[in-house]
Amino acid sequence: MIQPGNYVRDLLRRAPGDTVSAKGWVKTRRDGKSVHFIQLNDGSSPTDLQVVLDAGVVPPAVVASITTGACISVEGELVASLGKGQAVELKAKTLVVHGAADPEEYPLQKKKHNLETLRPLGHLRARTNTFSAVFRVRNALCRAIHQFFQERGFLYVHAPVISASDAEGAGSMFQVTALDLDALTKQAKPVDFEQDFFGKRTYLTVSGQLEAEIFAHAFANVYTFGPTFRAENSNTPRHLAEFYMIEPEMAFCDLEDNQDLAEAFLKSQVEQVLRDCRPDLEFLSKWYDPDLFKNLETLINSSFERISYTEAVALLQKAGRNWEFPVDWGTDLQSEHERYLTEELFRKPVIVTGYPKEIKAFYMRSNDDGKTVAAMDVLVPRIGEIIGGSQREERYDVLLDKIRSHAAHGMKEEAYWWYLDLRRFGGVEHAGFGMGFERMMMYLTGMKNIRDVIPFPRTPGNAEF
RNA sequence: UGGCAGGUAGCACAACGGUAGUGCGGCUGGCUGUUAACCAGCGCCAUGGAGGUUCGAAUCCUCUCCUGCCAGCCA
């Protein structure tokens, strides 16, 4: 295996004179009369290591097999480069081809490919410059998120992936079953879920929030970070059936604190990734989004605009536009409205709070006006809603009323006994939010399709690899 | 799921209803401490699928599958 200090990233920074070994995959080979140049990459760096292979070091047949995609290892001396474009290069003394890649068949060519073309090549696309940059950023973003919460004393909690209840009373869920569906379809009788693995109907989780609330009532500040599933037939560049979500939940926290944390959280992520992945971001900016750095710096340096839903409606009504969807107090903001607020009116992130209770989830805390709830959506340019959260309803009687008023929509009071118990035993005001991890990745990388920021995207009709 | 736009060679694209091409990639040779190398040669292989109209369909019609964009659902 490659030992610490011997990744291509490290070799590029070492001083000439060292004898080193490098392992990785070939990007391209260029031949001179008496010398071959090989661009080698092991995924650690957006810059390749140039290997210089003098004629005669390995037999011609071996040279011929050093083609785009081949896996090789090289030993030799790091030397100051005679050519332009790199400080050091590896002068090969020995070279081994571990796995050739027939150039007649290897799908990746030494030229630019469309992202759409690479998507069906999920087993190979990680070797491209673009995706190696994207996935290094993804790795760094994970680290940044944990660091942000760990520094603040938050406890990392793993919410269950299998859930017996629909967390928000809405949204399509994937059912989880160990029953033999083929056999069941041949029976005339209705399915008895008591015979199923868990003795009841179960689903893949759509949110870890309710479980996070449990832990917030024991550890005060907690966060989840794990996969989440939606069976919606959404076909957009912003939706996945399987995605990662970060959900902090804080006791002793109101909506103001919640907004402060969300703003600090977003800024911290951008700052850390700018610090840790600048070469990758430069690559992505060059090829995919010339405004990337400008946008990221705007997020860091601006103070987020905070407006109420009621104010937002007024602003939209006097925008002097023909909205495709009319703006009326009581209806949800549409994409076109959110984009106007964050991209045109304020030109920076916007936090909208205090939505009508009818369009938000049952667990959000009722405001004193009787009409709105303590909800918040964080909108950022280009992505739209990147965070959704709220202060939670901590008053037992109020929460019970809300659950009962949803009974007509299939919400069962009994299923929420433990959620209600949190309000009976040591309840406290608390709040939290959920951030779509891949949405944040899109913002950070400038990638325009969410399928290009997750290793193996799951979307309607697509679960390959 | 709805609206719109597309599916032609390994990739990117072209072709008035009349012989299916160009660039890149690949291969072959040449040249050069090269850098998305350069020069010359070789088409290597193709109209997503099923019907229909026509003397003749990549092109027109119907159905279907797939992809992208916009919208809805949301994170």
Image (cartoon, coloured by chain):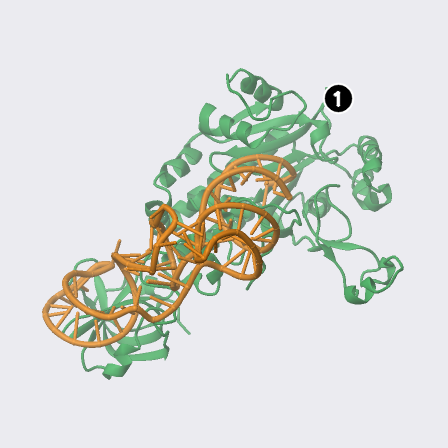
How far from the left and from the top, in percent, is residue A178?
A: 77, 64
Residue, x 40% and y 36% (percent of image)? Answer: A295
Q: Could you tell me residue B69's position as x and y percent?
A: 48, 41
Q: In the image, which lettered chain appears orange?
A: B
- As drawn, A231 above or below A296: below
- Which quarter of the figure is the N terminus of chain A placed in? bottom left
Query: Which one of the lettered chains is coloured green?
Result: A
Q: Position of residue A94 (x, y in %)?
A: 26, 80
Q: Residue at x 56, y 62 (%)?
A: A464
Q: Is residue A336 left or right of residue A71?
A: right
Where does residue A217 sit, x and y in percent of width and height?
A: 72, 43
Q: Is residue A224 visible?
A: yes
Q: Out of A429 and A398, give the one closest to the viewer.
A: A398
* Residue at mark 1: A370
Whether residue A151 is visible to the viewer of this picture, yes or no, is no
Chain letter for mark 1, please: A
